Each structure stands twice: as C-alpha cells, then as structure tokens.
Image (cartoon, grey):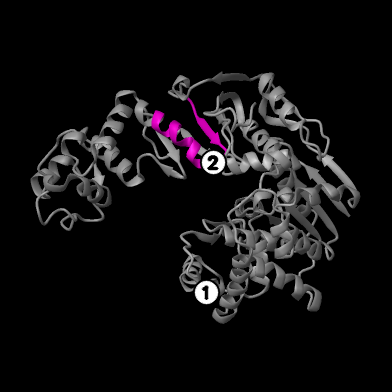
Amino acid sequence: MKTIILGPPGTGKTTTLLNLVDEFIQQGIRPKQIGYFSFTKKAATEAANRASEKFGLDRETDLAFFRTLHSYAFNQLGMTKEKMMGPDDYKEFGEKCGIPIKVARFSEGDGTFNSDNEYLTIINTAAVKRMDLLEYYDSRKNILDIERNTLFLLADELNRFKKEKGLKDFNDLLEDFIIKFDSDKPTNKFEVLFIDEAQDLSLLQWDMVRKIWSRAEKTYIAGDDDQAIFKWAGADVDHFIALKEEVDDIKTLDQSYRIPGGPIHDLSQKIIGKVQNRFEKEYKPRDEIGILKRYSDITQVDMSEGNWLVLSSANYFLDDAKDLCELQGWYYQYKGRNSIPLKLLLALNNWEAWRKGALLNHLEIKNVYEYLGASVLEGFRKGKTLHSEDKYSLKECKEKHGLITDQVWYDSFEGLDSLTENYIRNMRANGEAINKNPRIIMSTIHGAKGGEADKVLLMQDITNAALETFSYDPDELHRLFYTGATRAKRELHVLDPRDFNRAYIL
C-alpha cells in the first residue's frame, strides 16, 4: 500500500509523519522495521530524536534506518569517509587537469553538489538525472561558455581519477546501491517506509526509493510539489507528481498553521496558480489577517523590532540589507555567520557584566583577556594563574591576575577595526539585544526552505541565468517565490528590484 501525503507550507507535514511513526511503534512494529528517509539530514534526525525521546529508544541502534538516502546507501555498502571524494580530492583533480577548482563538495546533509566549476556541475547534474552526458549537454537551453570536447574529456578523466584513487562520490553510492540491490538484495525489509521531502528527489534517488519500497508493506511518500525548488540540482518534481497514477491514496493537509489570511495568502495563491503541472489542492490560512507592504528602496524598511527573515534568489542581492543592518545597528546573520562572532559577543557581554559585579570563570576570563591585549600584564594573558574550579571578580583579577583596566569595552578592547567598533556602539545605543541568536536572518530562498518568521522581507531580483531559465521553464521561478512568500507568519514585506527587467514581479 502506497500513500502520498501532500503538505503545503506550514500544515504540519513533518508532525503528521512523526505521529504516524508513533502509531506504528505503539502497534508493536519494531523500530528497526521502520525506514524513514528524507532529502535532508535535519528532517531524518528530527524524526529519530522524537521517537528516541518518546519511546526510550537508542538513536544509533534502534533507529538506525532514520537517515538520508545517501547515508543509507553509505551504510549498506560499508563505506568509510576516507573512500569518499572530498573538496581536497577535487582540488587535486583540478590541478592534475589544469583547471581551477576552488569549491567542489557534496553536502553531507542532502547530497547536493556545489561547485564553482560549471563543467563539474554539468557532469553531476547529468548523473542525478540519469541522462547521458551528451543528451543532457544538448538539452540545456541557456547559453554557457562550455566547450563540448573539454566537458567529455573532463568526465572521462574524473572517472579515471576516482578509479585510481579508489574513491566514490554520492552519485556513485546510489548507483552502487541499486546494482547491489538487484544482484544481492539487502536484508532490510521494512514494515513501514517513509519518504519525506519527496518533491526534492532526483531521478537517481527515485530509482533507489523504488528498490526500497518494493520490499515494504506500507509506504508513505510525503512532500509538496509547490515547494519543489531544487530542480537546478537535479530534483525531478514531475516524477513526484506522476506518482498519483501509481499510489493507492492521496491525502492533503489543507490547514496552514503559519500563513495568515488576507493579502499574504492571496498573493501566495496568485503565484502558485501560475504553475502548469501540479497537484491541485486546497490550502487554508490561519484566521489572523496578515500584513503586506511594498517598498521601492531598502532604506524604507524598518527592521528595528521583531524577528525577520530576509530572502532573495541569490546571496549577493542581500548585500544592501546587510549594509542597512550595519548602519542601523541591527544584529543579523548573513551566509550562515552572525554579524558579531560568538567569541567576541561572549567577551563583550562578559566584560560588561564583570564590570557590574558579576563573577567569571577561568574560560570566560581567558576569552576576555584575548581582547584586552596590553591591558593585561605579560605572563597573565593566557590565564595560567586562574584555577578552573574558581570564579573571580574583576577587582580580584586586577589585584592578583594581571588585569590593569576596568574601562568600558570600546576604551579597553584592542584589535577591533573601526567599522566593527562603530557597528557595536550603534547596536548598544539603539538597545539592540546582542544574544546568541540574531533576530534578523538573511538567506537565499533555497537556504530558508522549511524556515519561517513573523516578518519576511522578500526581494524580487533574479540572476541572468534565472531570467534565461524563466523564458522556457517559468514554473521553477513561480515555485521559488511561492516558497519565499509562504515563510511569513504575520507580515510580508516586498522590495522592488534594482532592475525591473531582471526581476520576478510579485
């Protein structure tokens, strides 16, 4: 029996799947008879952690089959990390072939390949699409400066390099799993199989999934075709949609617990209604009416309060938002990094607390001392006179442990550049809370999939490559901006593009 569970944004798809896991365990199905495979490591780990906590199960043994597909193949084939192609191996390959390769890696979380070398990207994408390299090369509509003979030469050299080194990449793992399954079927036969985030699976992954579910009693395939935004990485959403002809049942979670009613919901439905090939589904918002605002310039956006998610189609479009945050003294995260490094943040907060009478342990003091520089006497800067079991007052460290200042941080901290110092002073002057987690998160729409925030700022700029793709495959951009718009829990703020000729108009 096979069931599709459609989970539009914020409808609790993951919760529904985890509740089903609970039910089957309560019915007496042993955890090792349940396979839970997801496109991302995060989703698989969340499912395993919940089952582990609720039923007192061991994460590593009882729930060994709560994994990504790549991890499962890795496990079944008895692979080791040393046998996998890594960034250094790709750099060595590039040097051998005389081509620059700065970035080339597979994500351990979802197996997505990322590289600054277009030749490697094409080779990988053809593999996940299970297409002949020539066929895939000829199918590309957008014009790229890719020389055909060079492409085929590099593909041959890459295969030779991996064979000589005894290495595999993530695509090789899935191919080897499929071959092994056909010739020597794995011992795992699942009573219940869950495939999460199915809209993001490539054809290569689907071929693997079909092998696994051929031995499963019940299979649940969960996803949302409207949020299929990884086509560029080889995801095959059309395959997911076509499954409606094969399955026994289709269930739709139609009530969103995230998106508010009114203009935000109306806009999201307008966007997704443009997609030609999709599951038709009802999608009901919360009763609360959301707020939709539009701006012609980034400086008009007031992010002084609340939690924000700033989204764009590419990272470099976020630079203006980053500059605004620094000018205004707002705490933010950009490209996964906080605007103030954690080490400096801890030193600042601990120093100010110390000056007000708090006690610090030796690790906290050593961190502070690193920023005080000459304000700590030579021989004391590494905290060798401090004992790990004790806590110390600022006065005590001035008397016994080499500290010679008690001035405010901007008069005592050394090594901070003027921009950083001014930024922090702006933050403190504006009352910005400098905690572990910034309240403004900047991300590409792809990177924010699954995330949400009370307030979302969505930029309409698109790259030249996206514009070219839009001319022959508009659904890809419709789905991308639908995903971005549906991250908002209360307010959606839309920023006009820099160039209306290179934009997705909302």
> Label 2: which residue?
314
Look at the numbered discs 2 and 1 and tell me whether their residues touch, using CB distance below 8 Å. Answer: no
Place residue 395 in its image quadrant.
top left
> Label 1: which residue?
82
Report helix, strand or loop for mark 2.
Answer: loop
Q: Examine the rendered structure and indicate whether residue 396 appears above or below residue 268.
A: below
Amino acid type of the residue that numbered disc 2 sits on in the rendered structure: Ala
- Residue, far bottom: 164
**Residue at x 73%, y 42% (from the top left corner):** 472
Number of residues whose C-alpha sits closer than 10 Å to that of mark 2, classed few (under 14), some (14–19) or many (20 or more): some
**Residue at x 60%, y 44% (from the top left corner):** 465
**Residue at x 25%, y 56% (from the top left corner):** 388
Amino acid type of the residue that numbered disc 1 sits on in the rendered structure: Glu
Quadrant in the picture for the N terminus: bottom right
Viewer-side residue, 203 vs 33: 203
Percent coordinates x, y for residue 361 in the rendering: 26, 48
Percent coordinates x, y for residue 437 in the rendering: 44, 38
Q: Is residue 413 among what the camera can see?
A: yes
Q: Looking at the rendered structure, which numbered label has been put on residue 246?
A: none
Percent coordinates x, y for residue 363 in the rendering: 27, 52
What stretch of residues is rendered in magenta? 306-324
